[in-house]
Amino acid sequence: MATSLTSGRPNTLGVELPDLPVAPENGPDPVLEPWPSYNPGQFYDEMVGPDGAPRPAAEILWRHFAELGPEALAERQRAADREMRAIGVTFTVYEGTTGVDRPWPFDIIPRVVPADEWHVIESGLVQRLNALNLFIDDVYHDQRSVSSGVVPSELVAGSPNFRRECVGVDPPGGIWAHICGSDLIRDADGTVYVLEDNLRVPSGVSYLLENRMVAKHVFPEMFLHYSIEPVDPYIGRLADLLASVSPAPGDPTIVVLTPGVYNSAYFEHAFLAQQLGVELVEGSDLAVLDDDCVYARTIDGLERVDVIYRRIDDLFLDPEVFRPDSLLGVPGLIRAWRSGRVALVNAPGAGIADDKKVYSYVPDIIRFFLGEEPILATVPTLRCSDLESLEFVRANIGRMVVKPANESGGYGVLVGPQATADQLAHASQQIEDDPKRWVAQPVIPLSTAPTLCAGEVAPRHVDLRPFTLLGPERAYVTRGGLTRVARRKGSLVVNSSQGGGSKDTWVVDTTGPAPSGGPAPAAPPSRGHPGEPIA
Amino acid sequence: MLLARMAEAVYWAGRHLERAEGTARIVQVHTDTHVDLPVGEDVGWEPLLAIVGVHSEFAERYSAAAEAGDTAAAEEDVVEFLLHGDGNASSILSAVAAGRENLRTARPVVPREAWEASNNLWLACSDHMDEVKSRQGRVQWLRRVIAGCQRINGILLGTMSRDEAMSFLSIGQNLERADLTTRVLDVRSESLHSQHGDDPYDVVHWMAVLRSLAAYQPFRRAMPARPQGGATLRFLLQDDRFPRAVSACLTETRSHLKQLARSEAALEACATASMVVASAAVPRLALDGLEEFLDEVQVALDAIHLRIDETYFRPSFVDWHAQSEAS
């Protein structure tokens, strides 16, 4: 497989800008059945190797699709669509100001990940989340990372995600970001990168679980032939985690706090509350009384709440402290949290560690706090606030991805090679106007996976969002994650708010049952250096 | 713990779904009965509007037709209005949608399958809306509504814990049932009074009353009499075993209220309503004073709702705080 990773212009910043592989026209170099014209070209394909044969972990699935034939596959896709609609799995998109419920787009062809590769990723994610939590705790206490020069002081002081209300607070176990939804991508050479650490209110886990349920109904036979790691344990681990941070002894009262039925992730909030067997509350269901405790308005009067799994952004949590116009939050909530009378998951202020500028320092943060080499690779990131970087980005904007440092959901992202001249000029101007708002990265040619598009199976770009839980006692990573797929040919934007679809992700053990509690296996597929698993 | 907001949502889910099923039955039976009556004996389609209580909304929407001299409300207009009409918040489709919306809010406290069934019902209703223009399509559509509601009820019965959420849902359902039964009696009796005792179609009318409440067969098994005024009234008001009889609905409501803390005021209102129903002087009522009597029952039912509302749904943090300070 000819990748062009070394062909980029080297420069003093150490950033390489390889030429993107070209998406092939279907045809000249057909690979084997079941989809004779399937050809991912120079991209890394999750199912098919460079020789056109299925990757070992996907072989059974590949053969099965060949036997099934295109019509049966299409019928199973329709069955899956019907089921998603019937069980009411939706997400909300905003068209102007009105939210519209859309059925959740699910592509039935699963993405297969070999278990030994997954174990490395798992250790890498736990390592990262441990380090990020140490960093957050440090930011709100001694700031050793600043005084030691690991991160510049303006990174902390100048961040819109720094919350002075959090200074000096000691959440249980020193953990701030308990739940992390990471975005993983794979380069043309197979390297897995962490692209984002979402530490505020990451969403998607309900879709991961529902995708699996529907996949079981669509391909029941596959679950007999394969040893596919289950995803269900997530809910139990989440329940344990929430209980473990309760400030009160005994059986804690746990609630999920939602902005309400009009929020784009309301489906997920209701799903999680239902699966956890806890109440789903809105801000108006809660109050903080004179004793600094949080109470819920129940049919029997006021009942104390111990743990809040909040799905409302920091700034809307407490109108007494943050945005005074917020009707979603609970006045006094931060007071209650600071006094240790209620646990908030994730803690306010955790977002300091997931903006895209901090991202570029994560490898150093891991080395500083853990004394280990990062297990997973981080995409080289240029901060436009740096003059040399700014010049470089402006000169090469057509070959880079430019991102606002503080947005999520794919908003405001410019993919240079796919932008028009106007868009490039506009972005260039925006960057010049306010350089510190922007970061830039080389374009990673995302890996592809076979996807049903208008009756044809074609390669489409994917990423992967696993979820990591970190409690005072233990860590857990979902086995696999939510695979998001860009449904438009050649598109690199996978966010569901931008029209992306999803796939079930099968972590498959091809070597037989792994020894329980065994160490992570040998060679990682990444450029990063292996470390000891933390979990 | 049951949030006040969740309790209110399941209560209304119970009411709306019951209303959808009840209205569907009434329209269904009216369509069947209409076919049996000769022209002239026909009571028209307006009584349906009165039962659902949307006479004035209908008049507003269809005033153009009325002004053109078309006095009798046309079948298709009435049916369209009752099933899914614009401007009719009590249409079957609105009730199904509201039931689904409330179950969606209450997802954490109801079985997953119940929410899914209500979602399916709503999808099936809206997907097949264009079928209802023909009588035959309408029959299918109404059947779908009734079967969908029964499915939800079955899921709740078979899989939901008998917890507080279940109590609120059942109370909502039973109050709505009792209310619908009184409405059907109210409107039907009006059209029956205008006729003489020996009307050969009297039995047809009373059979229709029973059928629209799914009560015909239970009535036959329980009562020796022909379905005439007195016997029918006694059965639909005072029977304690037929689940849509007002008395039985109140018994159910009482047993669920007893499961809840602080239900004294609501229980008292429930006892008052039971007393009113038990005191009904049937069969004389069949001839005179039925309307006033049914009004009295409806007021008593509404009183139960108000007590529940002010005991469980309305109190604010301030109210609760004041209460705990006082005690």
Image (tube, helix red, strand yellow):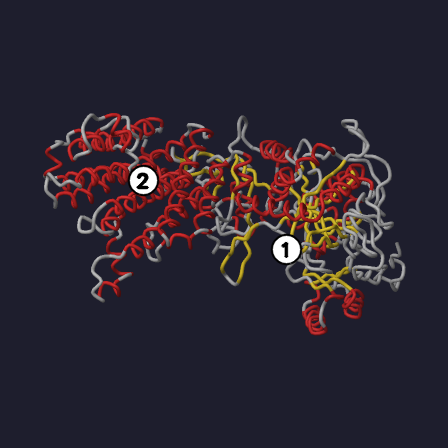
Q: Quadrant of residue A355?
A: bottom right
Nearer the observer, B272 or B317: B272
- Residue A14 in percent (x, y) is at 86, 59
Q: Can residue A486 be seen here?
A: yes
- Tell me whether marks 1 and 2 sit on the same chain: no
Q: Quadrant of the C terminus of chain B?
A: top left
Amino acid identity at mark 1: Gly
* Mark 2, residue position: B309
Which secondary structure lies at badge 1?
loop
- Residue A244 in percent (x, y) is at 61, 31
Image point (47%, 40%), residue name: B117
* Mark 1, residue position: A409
Q: Quadrant of the N terminus of chain B?
A: top left
Amino acid identity at mark 2: Asp
Crowd around label 1: few <14 · some 14–19 · many ≥20 (10 Å): few
The subunit carrying tag 2 is B
